Amino acid sequence: FKTLASLLTSAGLVTTLQSKGPFTVFAPTDAAFAKVPKATLAKLGNDKALLKSVLLYHVVKGNVPASKVVTLKKAGTVNGKPVSITVKGGKVYLNGSTLVTKTDIKASNGTIHVIDTVMIPRTARIALAAINLKDKAKAATAKAVDATKAATAKAVDATKGAATKAMDATKSAAEKAKEAVTPAPSTTAPAAPAKKP
């Protein structure tokens, strides 16, 4: 349970879960956490309150051994939201699809049941979706800003180019006009001096 232990430390829950209790923990394996998208784990790691909400959704107050779990339809969690419990084919599932793979691991202040999936309560899923939308909006805004900067730079370059061409054309026209008004050198032969009578 290395990943679980690490996240409990990040959420500041180690002391709480080491208190007298008793508690029953539905503990996801490292493989269960590996199935969670890395982006989701990163978002949970960056939001202590949200991480705490998810982790406490795996904790039930009181000592609830497997023999009692199978008699329940749901169990209230420390998160405040209950998990549903069903028994199918002799196997116990939480919320319909999370399989309990090992039961009744004794702890000093309660019981641990191992599960194959990290359970994320609906409230946390909504919060994660909101974070995703916010991140996408930021990315879209950044992309739009970059596009605007690129378009502005292109427009400035085009304006500079046009101005340069206009100046060159003006100079060329001025030179041509100057040539047109400059009198050509005279080619008329000087008049012969008048003969004396």
Image: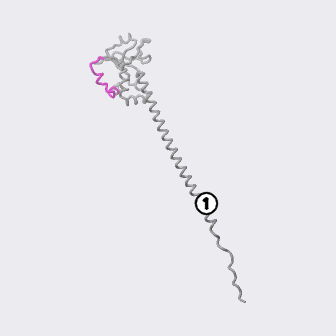
Q: Is residue 153 above or below residue 5?
A: below
Of residues 165 and 117, the one drawn nearer to the viewer in this rendering? 165
Q: Is residue 159 above or below residue 173?
A: above
* Residue segment shown in magenta: 7-22
Of residues 169 and 26, the one drawn nearer to the viewer in this rendering? 169
Of residues 54 and 26, the one drawn nearer to the viewer in this rendering? 54
- Check the picture and name the quadrant holding the N terminus: top left
Give percent across and percent down for residue 175.
60, 63
| Residue at position x 71%, y 87% in the image | 195
Q: Is residue 17 magenta?
A: yes
Which residue does the numbered mark 1 point to in the structure image? 173
Give percent across and percent down for residue 111.
32, 17
Q: Is residue 104 left or right of residue 166?
A: left
Quadrant for residue 44, please give it. top left
Image colouring: one colour
| Residue at position x 49%, y 44% in the image | 149
Q: How many marks?
A: 1
Quadrant for residue 117, please give it. top left
Q: Is residue 148 above or below residue 8?
A: below
Name the residue furthest left.
Answer: 20
* Disc 1 residue crowd, few under 14, some 14–19, many 20+, Cα 10 Å: few
| Residue at position x 32%, y 16% in the image | 61
Name the residue furthest right.
Answer: 197
Give percent across and percent down for residue 47.
37, 29
- Check the picture and name the quadrant holding the C terminus: bottom right
Q: Is residue 88 magenta?
A: no
Give percent across and percent down for residue 188.
68, 76
Name the residue furthest bottom.
Answer: 197
Q: Is residue 125 left or right of residue 190?
A: left
| Secondary structure of the residue carrying numbered label 1 | helix
Residue type, label 1: Ala
Q: Is residue 143 above or below residue 23?
A: below
